[in-house]
Image (tube, rainbow, N blue to C red):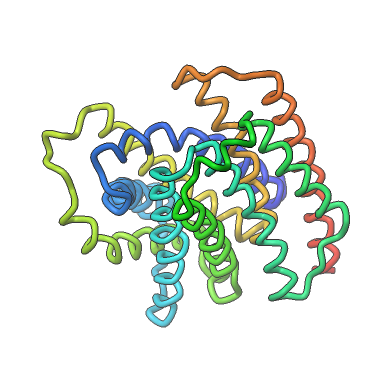
Amino acid sequence: MSDRTKAHILMVFLVTLWGFDYVPAKAGLEILTPMGLLFMKYSFGALALLVIKFLVLRNRILPQPRDLIIFAMCAVFGEILYFFCEYSAMDFLPVSLLTIILGFVPVVSVAAERVIYGRRANKVIIIGIAFCILGIVFVIGSDWHIIFQGRIRGYVLAFGAVLFWNVYNFITASERLEKYDAATLSCTQILCTLCLCSPMALHSLPALSEFTPAIIGGIAWLGIVDAGIGFLIMVYGLQKLGPTTAALYSDFMPVSTTFFGAIFLGESIRMMQVVGGIIVVTAGFFVIREKGRLDEQRLQ
């Protein structure tokens, strides 16, 4: 199995895991600020990655001091600013509308590739992304009036998350960091995140008595699975597939989010959502395959 094929399989697994993210995140935000949730989530994630890197993989590679500023930039854009915007937007926008907006991540990524690298997307990619966005709207199953439920601050935060995630993707996939393996990249980024967000988070943590077993378990899941294992997979996908192809997988998240919402939150799945899921998966498959073909041609 090639590295690219392995990366595709892992990215499918990842967006399935991340589709469950909103369930424990909304519960945690009932007692925590967005920065407090981020700090606790990444505390669990850092422990998980340290165990994976040093005990499981026996990886002793350390980052070079001159690259720490790049790792800090990854932490600021991909973890602190992205998740602060996403979690804060939940206070102003319905989750369904927020998920639609986050589906624009690959659109911005394609535009960024055109500006930064001069890579022009062909018609297959553009049409495919358009169908992905259409499918996302169907999957969410929202009436158009939901657009007017969001406050302007929520829209700014949501589109800020889209922008910051793309910045993170391009920095992580840059030539400056390609010499590091995924475990070293993920571990260093998450430790930088903890160092940077701890001054803002520690003073806002609630009393220990407010943490229920369900909230603690949800935060542990977010940290160990989503932040720890999840970012390890994400970094690997960025290295092997590039920022735009990896970003395309974000369009599959509404499908898994709707699935887990039906199981854990008792939300119903309508036929329109099933049709939307088929559109997203089908269009995403053609876009990812076409993007991979173009990338292989550039490497030849």
Question: Which image quadrant is residue 226 in?
Answer: top left
Question: Which image quadrant is residue 162 in?
Answer: bottom right
Depth check: 94 or 240 in front? 94
> Quick check: can you spot residue 93?
yes
Horizontal side, residue 124 vs residue 140: left or right: right
Q: Residue at x 71, y 24 (%)?
A: 272
> Quick check: can you spot residue 51?
no
State the residue lying farthest toward the right: 123
Q: Where is residue 229 shown, x and y percent of the image?
A: 45, 45
- In the displayed structure, 178 sits above or below 82; it is below
Counting the numbered discs, the total is 0
Depth check: 112 or 18 in front? 112
Q: Residue at x 79, y 55 (%)?
A: 291
State the residue lying farthest toward the bottom: 66
Quarter of the N terminus within the rendering: top right
Quarter of the C terminus within the rendering: bottom right
Q: Where is residue 130 shown, x and y percent of the image?
A: 77, 47
Q: Residue at x 41, y 62 (%)?
A: 189
Horizontal side, residue 2 vs residue 159: left or right: right
Q: Residue at x 60, y 36 (%)?
A: 145
Depth check: 216 or 177 in front? 216
Q: Where is residue 277 shown, x and y percent of the image?
A: 70, 30
Horizontal side, residue 299 vs residue 111: left or right: right
Q: Where is residue 156 shown, x and y percent of the image?
A: 49, 58
